Amino acid sequence: MIASEWLKLRSVSSTRYAIGAAALVIVLGAVWSFYVGTLADARGSIRAAAPEEGFLPLVQISLALVGVLAVTAEYGTGTVRASLTAVPRRGALLAAKATVVAAATTLSALAVIFITYAVSHLIAGDRAVGYNAGSFSDDLPLLLGSVLSVTVLALVGLGLGVVTRSTAAAVGLVVGLLFVLPGIAPYLPQPWNVRVGAWMLPNLVPQIAGERISTRLDGLLPPAAAVAVLAGYALVALVAAFLVFERRDA
């Protein structure tokens, strides 16, 4: 079952395009690092966001699309009926899809994020104070948290794809979780703006690494709690997908 789902995922051309879009971050990170290094040479020092952080949303959205298309592509072509004929147990089919999506997106995110990190360090070096200034061991929690966030968003995309059966709707909801809701949270009345904001997807990765998001959110969630909340996004999406998948026709 896992092998067949892996074959289906690889056979969809959009999977290669999505992973290619994520890999574009390596190039963008190299260009950004060269630009920052050039400014540092001219000004003496400069603080700038590391590319593996600044371009993380592109990796997240690109690989979330892999999760969405893992199921909506079958709905679009009608091949989901053949899949259900071959595997009548819908829970097992969904679990196989989730396993393959998680493996593919985790490996892709690991490669993209760690290569971007290595290339940016190689290009920028120590020319920019505050730019990639930490050691690898210091940066590792943030890098692994970034990888985890990509995997979670891919699984959220898979779950939303099952629920909506629409690529556009599922991608729109993922974009809403990643960009729209975090933009609304600061406008809530205090203290809910702080409490809700700390649970938003973009704010969880820094908290996993124990970094300060802002003065108001600093330390609101310990790293273990941030990991649990992040994993909870995937769990809720997959449980909702299972309940809908079990109760309706293909």
Image (tube, rainbow, N blue to C red):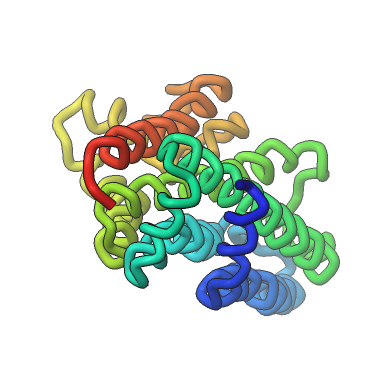
Residue at position x 57%, y 32% in the image: 208
Rendering coords of residue 248 (x, y %): 22, 43
The answer to whether 129 is drawn above or below residue 241 in the figure is below
Q: Is residue 157 visible?
A: yes
Rendering coords of residue 175 (x, y %): 33, 58
Residue at position x 46%, y 48% in the image: 153
The answer to whether 136 is drawn above or below residue 180 in the figure is above
Left or right side of 140 for 174: left
Left or right side of 173 for 226: right
Left or right side of 139 for 164: left
Along the line of sight, the residue nearer the viewer: 106 or 203: 106
Rendering coords of residue 172 (x, y %): 28, 61
Number of marks in picture:
0
Kindly give the residue lying farthest to the left in the view shown. 189
The answer to whether 34 is drawn above or below residue 114 in the figure is below
Rendering coords of residue 113 (x, y %): 68, 57
Left or right side of 134 for 211: left
Along the line of sight, the residue nearer the viewer: 60 or 202: 60
Q: Is residue 149 visible?
A: no
Residue at position x 75%, y 65% in the image: 120
Residue at position x 73%, y 42% in the image: 139
The quadrant where residue 211 appears: top right
Along the line of sight, the residue nearer the viewer: 82 or 26: 82
